[in-house]
Amino acid sequence: MSINKDVKRVTTHVIQEMKEKGEKITMLTAYDFSMARILDDGGIDVLLVGDSASNVMAGHETTLPITLDQMIYHASSVVRAVKRSLVVVDLPFGSYQGNSRIALESTIRIMKESGAHAVKMEGGAEIEESIRRILSAGVPVMGHLGLTPQSIYKFGTYTVRAKEEAEAAKLLEDARLLQELGCFAVVLEKIPARLAKQVAEHLAIPVIGIGAGPDVDGQVLVTHDMLGITKDFQPRFLRRYLELFEEMKKAVQQYAVDVRSGGFPNEKEQY
Ligand code: KIV
């Protein structure tokens, strides 16, 4: 299906309408100006300034080290590139869990200093107060359930979540709560496809999946993974559309050959 050219700017209302019409929502991560321009121009509906920047851009093992200042830097670079996409920014670990006042302060900094359109937060009932406070300030919130990488040391592994009945029931309950509170959408990460389908059917708001099967309202991937820039990360749910690590390596190797041989620059590439 082609992108809806009538939509000049994707808003939370636009993605709600997409769910109601059964149109799939596209979402990818972006952390910098150049990539965000490509994704926006390519018609991606939602750009997520994910805290996966901690892994992808900074080389950390987890998402925990990234700071609020660093997220704001990434988000403002993305916002400057965007003409159509909705820009959603992850609240980083430590900026919202446990204290709703701090959660609101962190959100206000993101919104004021980056110009982004919404925030995303990991968790359900345990962060209810923070979500309420942010929503009451008029900032749209996207939820995130299932595998929530900010809690990796609680889970111990990055394996599929909610396979057991009790965890699946809690996830469904949390998803209902997020909708009731007023979240505009929910991301479901790495859970059984059957459970994700059930959540998407139960909720009136859009459900975006990553490793959650096809029966949700939209899909999100980490752009560097789907382009094959990060070559060692190969979960089952990931489809690689390019092998850019190898392509880029070939290009830089050719550049080095040309420089070393004196073949670059040639007579047309000088003044
Ligand atoms: O940070 C991120 O990239 C995310 C996606 C995996 C949904 O939260």
Image (cartoon, rainbow, N blue to C red):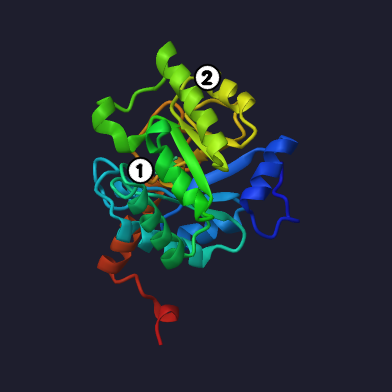
Left or right of 224? Residue 87 is right
User: Pointer 1: what residue?
Assistant: 230
**Label 2 vs label 1: CA separation?**
29 Å
Q: Quadrant of ligand 1?
A: top left
Q: Which mark is residue 24?
A: none
Whole-percent x and y of residue 108? 42, 60
Q: For the residue marked with disc 1, what is the amino acid?
A: Thr
Whole-percent x and y of residue 119? 46, 50
Camera-side residue: 22 or 68? Answer: 68
**First in residue order: circle 2 vs circle 1:** 2
Could one spot residue 205 in this view of the protein? yes
Compared to residue 144, the image places residue 40 above or below, namely below
**Which quadrant of the rendered structure holds the C terminus?**
bottom left
Q: For the residue marked with disc 2, what is the amino acid?
A: Leu
Find residue 19 and report its image quarter: top right
Nearer the viewer's eye, disc 2 or disc 1?
Answer: 2
Whole-percent x and y of residue 228? 41, 42
User: Pointer 2: what residue?
Assistant: 195
Camera-side residue: 126 or 199? Answer: 126
Q: Is mark 2 within 8 Å of ligand 1?
A: no
Left or right of 269? Residue 199 is right
